[in-house]
Image: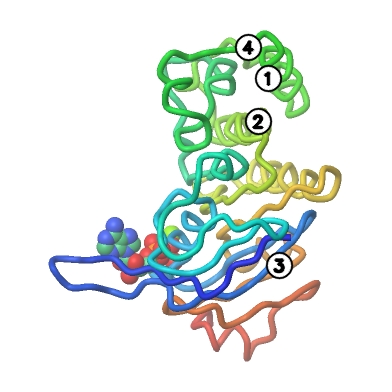
Amino acid sequence: MIKVNNLHKSLTDEGNKRHILKGITTQFEAGEMIGIVGPSGSGKSTLLRCLALREKWDNGEYTWDGNSVIKGGGRGPQKYRSKCAYLEQNPSLIIDKTALKNVLIGQAGQVSRLRRLVGMVRSDDYMGAMDELEKYGLLDKAKLKAGNLSGGEKQRVAICRALVHGAGFIAADEPVIGLDPKTAEHVLNTLKTLCKEQDKIVIAALPIELAEKFCTRIWGIIDGELRLDVKGRRLTMDEKRSIDLV
Ligand code: ADP
Ligand code: MG
């Protein structure tokens, strides 16, 4: 169980302090696939980066299975950061390295800087990475440079990379934007299967239609506040209206 209590986040923009997340309180647990919906600028990406410990919090409490990760400000220790993966819209793969090497080296923020720098690879990592790539139909792409992969393949390599490095929680920021509908479904089904079969937690910023189709729970956010938290059903028209989605 992951709990967030009163998460606040502000940013200073041209000297003006702006409150971006205004006291987010929630909890979620293994196996959940949560879709975050809300208008542009409502704070979806910031919330995802904070939850994945990729960005500092001003204030708030964060616990994993009762253990304190953050109390007050800060970004949380590496020990917890390595359990969270952050999937961006355009996965930050190293384009001139192979898919396999990308999986092995790991993600900035998830593995130590030293390990990334020297590309340290343990021999059991190699087998693990090949196993993951095979599971996602990417074995024949393992030796291709990441820059030559399609959008859906890149996103699946990023998912493999997250899993190989032990992520239990994947925060995904609009992971299927720009992908054709079939590929988008493939990527979202991949994430859904991880939740269902491996008890991972996925939280993804998604368009409402995809959140309703793939997620077990929907968070509606507007103006930095979590207004809706709905499980196992679609949003009503009134709910959509309350977060400016219609
Ligand atoms: P969303 O993902 O829902 O579109 P974001 O989390 O990206 O929203 O942004 C929330 C608010 O924070 C927006 O008003 C945006 O302009 C502001 N914001 C995001 N990143 C920065 C930044 N680095 N500096 C200043 N303001 C930012
Ligand atoms: Mg965003």
Up-down relation of residue 30 to residue 243 (above or below): above
Circle nearer the N terminus (4, 3): 4
Circle nearer the N terminus (1, 4): 4
- The one of 159 and 214 positioned closer to us in this rendering: 159
Residue that appears at 49% across and 69% down: 60
Circle nearer the N terminus (1, 2): 1
Circle nearer the N terminus (3, 1): 1
Q: Which of the two discs, 4 and 3, sits closer to the camera? A: 4
Secondary element at tag 3 = helix
Q: Which residue is mark 1?
A: 129
Quote the CA–CA distance across marks 3 and 1.
Answer: 32 Å
Return the mark for residue 41. Answer: none
| Residue lying at the far right of the rendered structure | 197
Secondary element at tag 2 = helix
Crowding near the residue tagged with mark 1, few <14, some 14–19, many ≥20 C-alpha atoms within 10 Å: many
Q: Which residue is mark 4?
A: 122
- The one of 218 and 65 positioned closer to us in this rendering: 65
Mark 3 touching mark 1, by CB under 8 A? Answer: no
Q: Is mark 1 within 8 Å of ligand 2?
A: no
Residue that appears at 65% across and 39% down: 167
Residue 38 in the image, given as x and y percentages of width and height: 51, 72
Mark 1 touching mark 2, by CB under 8 A? Answer: yes
Residue 96 in the image, given as x and y percentages of width and height: 41, 16
Crowding near the residue tagged with mark 4, few <14, some 14–19, many ≥20 C-alpha atoms within 10 Å: few
Up-down relation of residue 19 to residue 159 (above or below): below
The amino acid type of the residue labelled 3 equals Glu
The amino acid type of the residue labelled 2 equals Cys
